[in-house]
Image (cartoon, rainbow, N blue to C red):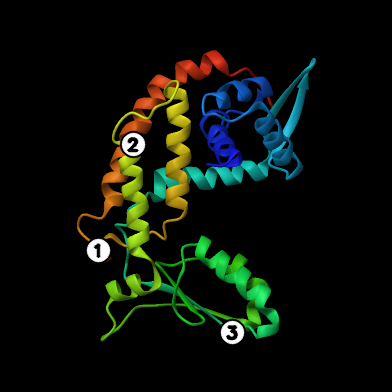
Amino acid sequence: MTPQSLMLNFLGLYVFGRDIAVYSGSVIDVFARVDVSEEAVRSTLTRMTSRGLLAKHRNGRKVYFGLTPRATEVLRDGEQRIWQRGAVNRDWDGTWTLVGFSLPEGRRGERHDLRSQLQWAGFGPVQNGLWIAPGTRDVTALVESLAENVTVFTAQHAKPTEASDLARRAFDTAAIGARYQDFLARWRNPLDAPDDLARQLLLHCDWLDLVRQDPHLPAELLDRDWPAIEAEQLFQALATRYAETATPIAEGVIESIAAS
């Protein structure tokens, strides 16, 4: 877990939606619980400010950090992935979004960037130059600069192609499942940490990183014992527990001011 990933999850838990700015010393105190040094915290705050994710506020000699509109959008996306989209896709209508592209060798860098962005957006390569994702996906922002070289459409599979075969061809389902198994192994028993505030932060960071890597494949195309089902239930149970036990700790540690 990088300091920035931890920072975004901390901000999502205790700053997002509150119109406040938090004292840098409070952040250092919280992050000491998860073995992140003061130097790393200050460096992360500075870097995120320079990237337009945080706004600096001063109150006397103290420095506080609040969210920018850009950070708010990032955190809203994380909240939707965790609590609305979830880890298990039970609403698939049989549609696939397909992105076909052809870029010459001289544009290798653009081709690499497009593949990386498609992967981040939940697409997988079904064959050379053709990537797919379940459901209807809006990829306008990803491909608009390459419009002449990219074709986007939605479709449904047809015999002899099976949807489950498409999913396994385009996505490494074994690796995805293994990541959920790793999550279960880490969190079935209480994590060794100073307190539940630390556990809450680590839990949310671990889970959000996991669901961001998940292409959200339809449950009907996967094994009945798909580990994401149990992992999501465990996450939700722990998140509910830590919301109760970590909040009093956070209230005693986090110093804030109004951001506006």
Q: Is residue 245 above or below residue 94?
A: above
Label of residue 187 in the image? 2
Asked where in the image residue 192 lies, by quadrant, the reply is top left
What is the C-alpha distance between the residues marked 1 and 2? 26 Å
The numbered disc on residue 102 is 3
The residues bearing labels 2 and 3 have C-alpha atoms spaced at a distance of 44 Å
Q: Please, what is the three-letter code of the amino acid marked with disc 3?
A: Ser
Up the image or down, 221 lies above or below 128; here it is above
**Along the horizontal axis of the image, is 197 left or right of 67?**
left
* Picture quarter with the C terminus: top right
Between tags 2 and 3, which lies in front?
A: 2
Q: Residue 220 got which mark?
A: 1
**Is residue 243 found left or right of 99 in the rendered image?**
left
Q: Which residue is painted at 35% across and 44% down in the image?
A: 183
Mark 3 near mark 1, Cβ–Cβ under 8 Å?
A: no
Q: Secondary structure at mark 2?
A: helix
Say what amino acid the circle numbered 2 marks: Trp
User: Of marks 1 and 2, which one's residue comes earlier in the chain?
Assistant: 2
